[in-house]
């Protein structure tokens, strides 16, 4: 089964993304999503190749955000696509049936659409306000997750759901009690000076409330 903790990279430059990912891996994160929107710099700096090497070294899953061609070129473990990104079907045709394809969602309808598109997991959010995304969808909160998870059960639909958006350590028990599979975080890990302790704490809390 997929890791309960996903780390989504942050940084103003390709080098910052690389260093933040390296730190997250050293701290024990075993699922990395490279989310760097400057494709030209990403290609020039060979960022995806460098991150792939790091993930192989740490035996971590490596997911590329948005750029299917780059994911294919570096043989990443998969791709994560936003609602306005490339289609799941096109990504699957390019990457093949064995690669992981995740998709963003904000509503029950989005999640159902992602399931119909045969997404392998869904990043559902935001949990609360976050500065990571410029165009923020309506806040879900714990109640929103609970409602969506229960609606999916009622329809006999299932997919691993990751809560995302402004999550803090004190939210983990509440979030996991909604029935989601895990969490995807950026700033929580990036900005913490004691990353290893934090990652251990997050994993302990999530498995305790699974």
Image (cartoon, rainbow, N blue to C red):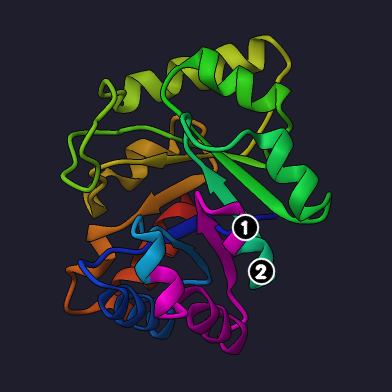
Q: Which residue is mark 2?
A: 73
- In reply to whether residue 57 is colored magenta, the answer given is yes
Q: CA distance from mark 2 to mark 1?
A: 6 Å
Query: Crowding at label 2, few (<14), some or many (≥20) Cα neighbours within 10 Å?
Result: few
Q: Which residue is mark 1?
A: 69
Q: Quadrant of the N terminus?
A: bottom right
Relative vertical location of residue 61 with respect to residue 37 in this rendering, above or below: below
Read off the magenta span: 42-70
Q: Position of residue 3 (x, y in %)?
A: 57, 59
Asked if residue 76 is positioned above or below residue 102 in the image, the reply reads: below
Identify the residue shown where x is 57% and y is 86%.
Answer: 53
Residue 72 drawn at (x, y percent): 68, 63
Question: Are discs 2 and 1 less than 8 Å apart at CB?
Answer: yes
Q: Position of residue 152 (x, y in %)?
A: 61, 17
Give the secondary structure at mark 2: helix
Q: Is residue 153 above or below residue 13?
A: above
- For the point 33% across and 27% down, the residue is 142
């Amino acid at each position: 089964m997929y890791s309960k903790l996903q780390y989504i990279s942050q940084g103003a430059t390709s080098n910052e993304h690389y260093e933040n990912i390296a730190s997250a891996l050293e701290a024990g994160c075993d699922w990395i999503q490279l989310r760097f929107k400057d494709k030209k710099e990403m290609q020039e700096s060979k960022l995806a190749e460098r991150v792939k090497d790091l993930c192989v070294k740490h035996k971590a899953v490596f997911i590329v955000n948005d750029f299917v061609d780059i994911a294919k070129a570096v043989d990443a473990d998969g791709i994560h696509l936003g609602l306005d990104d490339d289609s799941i079907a096109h990504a699957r045709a390019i990457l093949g049936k064995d690669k992981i394809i995740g998709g963003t969602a904000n509503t029950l309808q989005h999640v159902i659409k992602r399931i119909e598109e045969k997404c392998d997991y869904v990043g559902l959010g935001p949990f609360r306000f976050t500065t990571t995304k410029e165009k923020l969808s309506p806040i879900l909160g714990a109640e929103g997750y609970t409602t969506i998870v229960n609606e999916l059960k009622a329809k006999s639909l299932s997919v691993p759901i990751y809560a995302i958006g402004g999550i803090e350590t004190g939210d983990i028990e509440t979030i996991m009690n909604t029935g989601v599979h895990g969490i995807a975080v950026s700033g929580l890990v990036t900005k913490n000076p004691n990353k290893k302790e934090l990652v251990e704490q997050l994993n302990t809390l999530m498995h305790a409330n699974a």
